[in-house]
Amino acid sequence: MRMHIRKINSSGDVKFRTDTDSLGKVEIPAEAYYGAFTARAIKQYHVTGQRSHPYLVMAFVMIKRSAAVANMKVKALDKKRGDAIVKACDQVLSGKHLDQFVVEAINSGAGTAFNMNTNEVLANIALEILGKKKGDYESLHPNDHVNMSQSSNDTFPTAMHVSILFDTVQVIPAIDELIKTLAKKAKEFSSYQKIGRTHLMDALPVTLGSEFAAYATAVAKACDAIVEAKKELEKIALGGTAVGSGANTPKGYRTIAISELAKISRLSLKPEPDMQFGLESRFAVAKMSSTLRNLALELGRIANDIRLMASGPVAGLSEIGIPAVHAGSSIMPGKVNPSLAECMNMVCFDIIGKDSTVALAAQAGQFELNVMLPVMVKSVLDSMDMLRNFVPIFSKNLIEGLTANKTKLGQYIENSPVIVTLLAPKIGYQASADLFKESLKTGKTIRQLVVAKELLTEKEVNELLG
């Protein structure tokens, strides 16, 4: 293929080459490893200003490497080209040329633009390995060789699963650490009695420790669901090509490609038994997204409880103290805000919103393919990134530093008329209700009223109320 080189300006720095695709000729920066398809795509997809996630890049390159190995093993791809593609993949996986993956995170339906970005970059790296020039696609072609036995329709869903699994490996330890920190606080606070609350109103006493133990249980259950959701993601449709039929794949290719991908990714990957399902349904991704949403619901609830318990220090509940991570106000000196809990709330809101995006995209597929793939994987990976980045900070810098205000906790129990509930079996419901009202009206405690009215002895009251 003849290469046309020209200078972009009189300074003579930037040069262009001319690549050709099925639509015609395209001018591309001479140093770029991407090609014509990518050059066209980056002019169309100005959406988020964000490139595709590094884990998605890694997953795609691993897929291309595995496909090249499989194609060589089944004698569909000659060793010279195949080895060059493998070496090109290894260069990218070592951290080189990552700036060449320029297609935005939200791009064409089914992620074809990103798949072709990957094909072109790897093809041009491989061409240089072979001693050829970029764009010499007669020697090694992005579609015919790098994309051999593949389609965007099976590679992108596979890359979605692999990239999300990569992120899951980072998320789970962060959540586990939060569970441990909450459990540690539960033990530390086990002797601190406090007033319980239902409907935001006084209820029977609990302990601060039991509250935090319940938080640990909630997060643990949410984490268990994430671990369970991983199992669906481990089933991949690689080898399904365009409609799940496996068209244009040589015999034995699929088994070898998936085995190679499992090996290089170090993930427990296995073939999806129903490849057509594997392309038309995004069940596994939606399931994982929903577990992140459920975790966010629990984390947001816990953050809200902490904000309420820490409210004050004078006009709020002030049951717990929060560590100061920075000044709370630009105008009110000395103010300490529950800033990390507030940040957690915002993270949770965003995750819940992203799950709604995933849910809508998951049901928006038609017939043999769901094309809403880029926005789905972006949403899930963004949610996971926020969790793995912020949960450790929330755990260490907020939860770990919480302190109990024993005086306030004790006062609320002693002064709340609701503790008359513990006396009701002895003195009756109606008498207890009357004492409740009198306590509110007079400001006298239930303990004082019961003893003064000689309904119970001081010893009996102390045994019942503690």
Image (cartoon, rainbow, N blue to C red):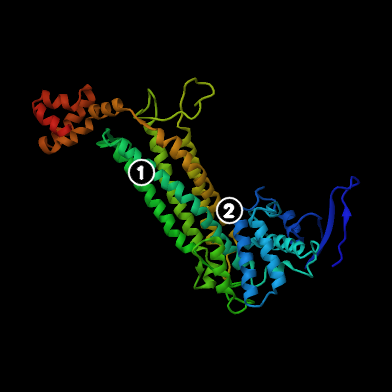
- Answer with the quarter of the image where residue 25 lies: bottom right
Residue 318: image location, x then y, percent: 36, 28
Using the image as rendered, state which of residue 455 and residue 185 is in the foreground. 185
Residue 126: image location, x then y, percent: 73, 63
Q: Quadrant of the N terminus?
A: bottom right
Is the residue marked by circle 2 packed among few (<14), some (14-19), or many (20+) residues within 10 Å? many
Q: Which mark is residue 215?
A: 1
- Answer with the quarter of the image where residue 427 lies: top left
Circle 2: residue type: Lys
Of callouts 1 and 2, the N-terminal one: 1
Give the residue at x 61% y 52%: 54
Q: Is residue 176 left or right of residue 372?
A: left
As helix, strand or loop, the secondary structure at mark 2 comes to helix
The answer to whether 200 is drawn above or below residue 49 in the figure is above
Residue 15: image location, x then y, percent: 85, 52
Circle count: 2
The answer to whether 188 is drawn above or below residue 43 in the figure is above
Using the image as rendered, state which of residue 197 and residue 307 is in the foreground. 307
Give the residue at x 50% y 21%: 332
In this rendering, does residue 302 appear at all?
yes
Q: Which mark is residue 378?
A: 2
- Answer with the quarter of the image where residue 149 lies: bottom right
Is the residue marked by circle 1 packed among few (<14), some (14-19), or many (20+) residues within 10 Å? some
Q: Quadrant of the C terminus?
A: top left
Give the residue at x 54% y 23%: 330
Q: Is residue 101 left or right of residue 181?
A: right
As helix, strand or loop, the secondary structure at mark 1 comes to helix
Between marks 1 and 2, how big is the CA–CA gap?
29 Å
Circle 1: residue type: Tyr
Residue 6: image location, x then y, percent: 89, 55
